Image (tube, rainbow, N blue to C red):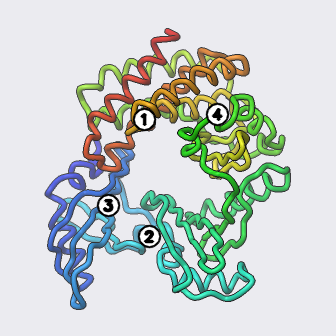
Amino acid sequence: MPDDGMRLLTSPRVEPLLRAAVEHQGGSLLSWSLDHVDAAPEHSTTATYLARIRWPHGERTELLGVSARTGELSASDARAEIFDDGNRRVAVWLYPNDPDLVGLPTAAFPERMADALNSGGVLARPVTGAQLSLSMIGYRPRRRAVVKVVVNDPSEVFYVKVLRERLFADVLGKHTMLRDAGIPAPEVALATPEHLLVTRELPGMSLARALFEPGDPCTAEDLIGILDAMPPAVAQLERRAPWADAVGHYSRMVSATLPDAADELAWMADEISTRLARYPQGDEPTHGDFHEGQLRVTGGRIVGILDVDTIGPGRRADDLACLIGHLSTIQRMNAEQEAKVRDLLARWVPVFDRRVDPVELRLRAAAVIISLATGPYRSQEVDWRQQTLQMIRSAGALVRQVV
């Protein structure tokens, strides 16, 4: 099996590389811990580390990133520092200088972000870095980042998507397409040469939060309706493979970190792939990553839809299955919250069953759960084993309903 770097980057053997990289930057590594792991088995591994570093000007905790590949390093790896441990070459960088996200240094520092907003004429007045509050909403090293920007006095909120160059024009076009069709996607306030997409905050609250407020956050019919309202042009976009197409890949990823579950995962992946093979690809306009974190609601109705980067042709069952998969794997709920989610699923799923094939829906939802089961380990959750096993059991229950 090709050495994808997983064993090196997740073991103490990585320390000499981290130490060399820090010393190259003029610092001294005091301590480190694994923060996040992204793996493409047999191809590549990227890991980030929280590192305590002594610099000439004082001590700081920094985020270090390292990428290893089975073959040659990529063109963008050259933007990082290349180190050789005698067996392989790896790319190492210090946040925010991510080699694939050239706009991240702008989005990470208030003064630079203020300059970008001022240059783009986004606000009615110029602002300084002192008037901005930045918070990282999500960071997938070498893939994407989302930064929340709050402008103070008076308050305005923006979200900055930090994108890879090859995806930028496509994502911008998708936002425009949906907005022009009346779909409540975020309004683009600024697109920069560094591949930053600055969008205005949508109204309402996240469905992920509204789930636990009194009453129903929206109806199952609303959820189907926002998807069915997408313009036909979405079905002409480039096709994105549904989650179920990669169920074998994700099952192997989970098995690599939890070998005891390998047989169960292999069985599920085989059942899902075999049984879904009889369904055509589908040409309905779809969201592609439809879950509770992507929707804004108010007054029991949907008022916004986020992360439209993934829209394209597909099957409605994929979108509804994605939502079921995510709702079935929410972590750290109390008993009351668990009961609320179970109740919503019990009422929503029968409505979904009338819109799409119930067998397909469950198989695709199980595939989504298996993809999500990579998350606790990637994020290095303290109880990642237990979380992962819970997800595997949830996926297995769905598959066994229909086989």
Position of 146 relative to 123 (above/below): above
Question: Which mark is first along the chain, 3 or 4?
Answer: 3
Position of 206 relative to 85 (above/below): above
- Left or right of 219 on screen, residue 256: left
The kind of secondary structure element at disc 3 is: strand
Which quadrant of the figure has residue 264? Answer: top left
Viewer-side residue, 400 vs 211: 211
Label 1 amino acid? His
Question: Which mark is first along the chain, 2 or 3?
Answer: 3
Marks 3/2: CA–CA distance: 13 Å
Q: Which residue is mark 4?
A: 216
How many tags in the picture?
A: 4
Numbered label attached to residue 99: 2
Viewer-side residue, 107 vs 309: 107
Q: Which residue is mark 3?
A: 48
Numbered label attached to residue 202: none
Q: Residues within 10 Å of mark 1 (few under 14, many from 20)?
A: some
Q: Residues within 10 Å of mark 3 (few under 14, many from 20)?
A: many
Q: Which residue is mark 1?
A: 249
Which one is in front in this view, the residue at disc 2 or the one at disc 4? 4
Label 2 amino acid? Pro
The answer to whether the residue labelled 3 contacts the one labelled 1, judged by CB atoms less than 8 Å apart, is: no
Residue 384, horizontal then vertical, whole percent: 29, 40
Which residue appears at 32% of the width and 61% of the height? 48
Position of 115 relative to 67 (above/below): below
The kind of secondary structure element at disc 1 is: helix
Marks 3/1: CA–CA distance: 22 Å
Viewer-side residue, 245 vs 311: 311
